DNA sequence: CTAGGACCTGACGTTGACGTCAGAGGCAAG
DNA sequence: CTTGCCTCTGACGTCAACGTCAGGTCCTAG
């Protein structure tokens, strides 16, 4: 498929796909005239890349880890990196959970006062 | 206390504190000569601000929600905003959990191959 | 064959939360 | 009174993941 179709099917912009290629995250075959051609699995790959970006990984880190996903192999260094990112995400989940609970507190305390009176609506 | 002490106790930079004031997130009394003076509770407030930044809220959103935390009151609009941010964080937690599980998969599959052989270490 | 999308390669613009630097003033110690 | 650290305002720099524009090419429908 061409870049426009991949962009739509993966839910990202054409610009983003070119950027991923520039960062070494996404390879593309080229047609005779130089247009990028992608195989079907590229859709899933782009979604994975998006997941990792959303988890706070940088292009460089993703570029270091994707080969592990592709080849299914890892060096001691990449294993350490994978584990480190995993733990960072775990910590992020924990902090987000605390933040959510804090927001819930705020919601409860502003929606209902200490003496049980619901606040006026404006 | 002065800005340097608050920065150290809250674990942020002096620049960040000035930025928070500029964004209307953190008020400071001023000494005769114009230096900022903070009361003790400012430490907790700064930590809260950091929590919200870490959860992906922008300065503007935080500025809209902090009055609810301060006064303990909320309008229908701010309640909607609070709930919306809470739900967004919930979604973020869910996605991060999927990402972490995906990384765990990768770690398992690269550390141990299908046929049960542990990969060579280099 | 031609109109008009889709695509190409640069290259500069954007945004948010600060970092950093310049130049000037404030403050406790010796 | 001076030394040295802290603080002030103002303003430009940074970084990452793209957005956007310019100028040109490709390709398919009619």
Image (cartoon, coloured by chain):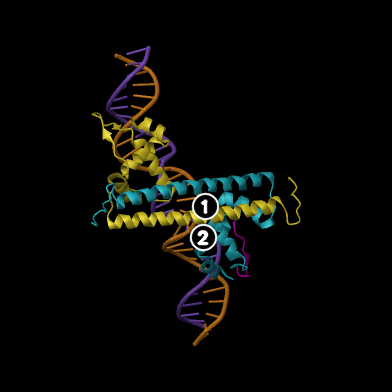
Chain colours: A yellow, B cyan, C orange, D purple
Name the quadrant containing residue B22. Answer: bottom right
Query: Which is the main secondary structure of the residues drawn in magenta?
Result: loop
Q: Residue at x 32, y 55 (%)?
A: A79
Q: Tell me the magenta residue range.
A: B25-33
Q: Is residue A119 magenta?
A: no
Subunit of label 2: B
The alpha-carbon separation of the residues under discs 1 and 2 comes to 17 Å
Q: Residue at x 60, y 53 (%)?
A: A103
Q: Are circles 1 and 2 on residues that touch, CB within 8 Å?
A: no
Crowding at label 2, few (<14), some or many (≥20) Cα neighbours within 10 Å? few
Crowding at label 1, few (<14), some or many (≥20) Cα neighbours within 10 Å? many
Q: Position of residue A63 (x, y in %)?
A: 32, 48
Mark 1 highlights which residue? Answer: B55
Side of A36 where B25 appears, left or right = right
Name the quadrant containing residue A28. Answer: top left
Name the quadrant containing residue A75. Answer: bottom left
**Mark seen at residue B16:** 2
Q: Secondary structure at mark 1?
A: loop
Label 1 vs 2, first from the N-terminus: 2
């Amino acid at each position: 498929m061409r870049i426009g179709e991949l962009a739509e099917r993966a839910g990202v912009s054409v610009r983003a796909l070119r950027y991923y290629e520039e960062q070494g995250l996404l390879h593309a075959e080229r047609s005779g005239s130089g247009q990028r051609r992608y195989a079907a699995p590229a859709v899933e790959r782009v979604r994975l890349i998006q997941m990792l970006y959303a988890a706070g990984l940088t292009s460089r880190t993703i570029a270091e880890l994707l080969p592990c996903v592709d080849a299914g192999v890892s060096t001691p260094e990449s294993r350490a990196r994978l584990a480190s990112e995993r733990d960072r995400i775990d910590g992020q989940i924990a902090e987000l959970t605390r933040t959510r609970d804090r927001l819930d507190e705020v919601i409860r305390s502003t929606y209902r006062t200490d003496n049980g009176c619901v606040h006026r609506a404006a």
